[in-house]
Amino acid sequence: MNTRAGQPTSALYGFSSLLLKLLREQKPSGVAFAIDRPEPTFRHDAYPAYKGTRDAVPSELTRQLETLERLLDALGFPRFSVRGFEADDVLATLARELSSAGEHTLIATGDRDMLQLVSPLVQVLFTGQRGKPATLYDEAAVVARFGIPPGRLPVYAALVGDSSDNIPKVKGIGPVAAQKLSLQFADVASLIAHADQIDNPKLRDNIVAHAEQLRASERLIRLRADVPLPDSPRHAALTPESSSATRVLFEELEFKSLIPRLEALLKSAAPRGDTRKRP
């Protein structure tokens, strides 16, 4: 997609369409965004090859990311971006704060790493499968999908690796063995400290031999929920002012089909003080 002037807009349109759909279906009382920063994070400092296999961002997408900043400004939802941390860590911190206050939180993401955050008060709406409906994960759904509770996913991933982030697997350990070990041990530290409890001698020796790799991998995989966030509102609702500013930008981007959806949202907006899930 491009405007008549040739400005690429396909990613912006997809983002805007998904956001309006989430607002319509989930009816959140507030919304916040987490944005990655361009600088290396603590994970890159610890492991320079982290995400090293990913392709460079296409130039057309880079141009749209610049306009995304304007779109988020127009929407008026707070966005958080902290040097040295990934957006995933920011979301983990926001989820911890909200759930500690007894508030239900919904994380909308295309990153399966976020599933480790699922708890009684935190759900994840996974939107990463193109052309397929989003999948809502609560604790039962995570167990049904992986066979282990959400909190055990970091040790599981440390064992099987993560090719998308360029995190190596432990050779000789497949998903079945990793699942069993993740059920037996809550984290890598427990796995290594009590390796003598592993019945299979070959598997036990393999774990001991890869102890340092496992420790390093888990540090990369486990999300940080202690990001120093600024002292500012954690979420905001769509307002008449933000809706008007967004409409102006939609007209500039020639998103004519999205304008009626935006206006319909404002008319059916949830009242202030409503405590529903926050994407």
Image (cartoon, grey):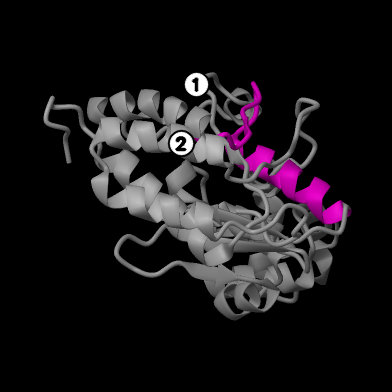
Span highlighted in magenta in the image = 75-100
Residue 190 in percent (x, y) is at 83, 58
- Check residue 267 for magenta coloring: no
Near-viewer residue (258 or 143) = 258
Give the residue drawn at x 61%, y 55%. 107
Closer to us: 232 or 65: 232
Q: Residue 207, percent across and down?
A: 68, 57
Can you identify the residue that label 1 sits on? 38
Q: Position of residue 8 (x, y in %)?
A: 21, 32
Give the left or right position of residue 84, taking residue 164 as reference: right
User: At 69% across and 57% down in the image, what residue appears?
Assistant: 271
Query: Taking 216 as reference, is 107 above or below it?
Result: below
253 displayed left or right of 96: left
Q: Left or right: 25 with respect to 95?
A: left
What amino acid is at disc 1?
Pro
C-beta proximity under 8 Å, tags 2 and 1: no
Badge count: 2
Q: Quadrant of residue 53?
A: top left
Q: Which residue is mark 2?
A: 244
Q: Look at the numbered disc 2 and give the secondary structure of its residue.
A: helix
Along the viewing direction, whichever of 149 and 64 lies nearer the viewer? 64
Graded by Cα atoms within 10 Å as few (under 14), some (14 to 19) or many (20 or more), the crowding at tag 1 reads few
